[in-house]
């Protein structure tokens, strides 16, 4: 059965989120007071008030904080959009995890060189909430396409995110490299899932328009 939820607006919001997040990271790297290795250094280092060498890093930290603040605003707006969409399945859950993502982004602004636990907790809430969003969008994409496509998206998502979670938990040496792969996998999964879902509203609209046209013809 075709859903009438308009996923195009959600795709716009999530695309904006990815652009803001990565754009903020790039800007923070440019003003980072030292050499930031994109492959080996964690993005959390961009939000620290000092570099590992002890140099002042408030410029990069300020960019990181603004980046997280805008991220919080985006997910707050998404929570409102989900709450208003009565055609969307698991609407309450989507609202809840959007709120936790926004709160996580706010808590992640704590500089990890002074408040490591708080920063990691906030980042965990943010990433975990987005991961849950991805799972729900995969379920939507499976309905719009096929079960096989849903399995493919799950493999893409879980093979990157869960592997990063494992390397982070055991403090594996490659965890910071895997972090970038996980972000790419998460962003790509949501983009592909929403791309598939975006085809569904237009199909539903055409069906509704066709029925209305037939009904009008009969009444005449």
Image: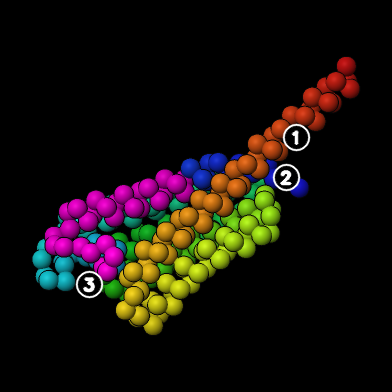
Span highlighted in magenta in the image: 13-41
Element assignment for label 2: loop
**Which residue is pictured at 44% across the width and 78% down the height?**
166
In the figure, is residue 205 to the left or right of 10? right
**Which residue is pictured at 51% across the width and 45% down the height?**
11
Q: Report the residue marked by disc 3.
A: 114
- Above or below 210: residue 29: below
Q: Label 3, label 2: how many angstroms apart (C-alpha)? A: 50 Å
Q: Is tag 1's residue or tag 2's residue first in the polypeptide sequence?
A: 2
Circle 1 packing at 10 Å, graded few (<14), some (14-19), many (20+), is: few
Q: Report the residue marked by disc 1.
A: 207
Q: Is tag 3's residue or tag 1's residue first in the polypeptide sequence?
A: 3
- Above or below 31: residue 43: below
Does residue 64 appear in this view? Answer: yes
Q: Dots 1 and 2: beta carbons under 8 Å?
A: yes
In the figure, is residue 163 to the left or right of 143? left
Q: Percent x, y for residue 179? A: 37, 67
Q: Label 1, label 2: how many angstroms apart (C-alpha)? A: 9 Å
Q: Percent x, y for residue 102? A: 42, 57
In the rendered image, residue 180 lying in the magenta stretch gets the answer no
- Above or below 164: residue 74: above
Observer-nearest residue: 82 or 166? 166
**Which residue is pictured at 40% across the width and 77% down the height?**
167
Q: Report the residue marked by disc 2.
A: 2
Q: Quadrant of residue 200?
A: top right
């Amino acid at each position: 059965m075709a859903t009438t939820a308009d996923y195009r607006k959600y795709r716009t919001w999530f695309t904006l989120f990815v652009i803001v997040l990565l754009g903020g990271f790039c800007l923070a790297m440019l003003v980072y007071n030292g050499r930031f290795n994109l492959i080996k250094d964690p993005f959390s280092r961009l939000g620290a008030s000092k570099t590992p060498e002890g140099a002042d890093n408030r410029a990069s930290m300020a960019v990181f904080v603004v980046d997280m603040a805008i991220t919080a605003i985006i997910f707050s707006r998404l929570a409102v959009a989900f709450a208003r969409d009565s055609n969307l399945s698991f609407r309450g859950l989507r609202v809840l995890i959007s709120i936790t993502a926004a709160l996580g982004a706010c808590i992640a602004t704590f500089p990890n060189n002074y408040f490591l636990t708080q920063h990691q907790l906030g980042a965990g809430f943010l990433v975990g909430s987005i991961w849950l969003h991805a799972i729900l969008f995969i379920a939507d994409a499976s309905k719009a396409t096929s079960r096989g496509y849903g399995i493919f998206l799950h493999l893409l998502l879980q093979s990157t995110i869960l592997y990063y979670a494992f390397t982070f938990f055991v403090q594996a040496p490659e965890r910071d490299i895997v972090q970038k792969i996980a972000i790419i996998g998460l962003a790509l999964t949501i983009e592909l899932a929403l791309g598939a879902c975006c085809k569904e509203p237009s199909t539903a609209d055409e069906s509704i328009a066709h029925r209305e046209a037939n009904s009008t013809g009969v009444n005449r």
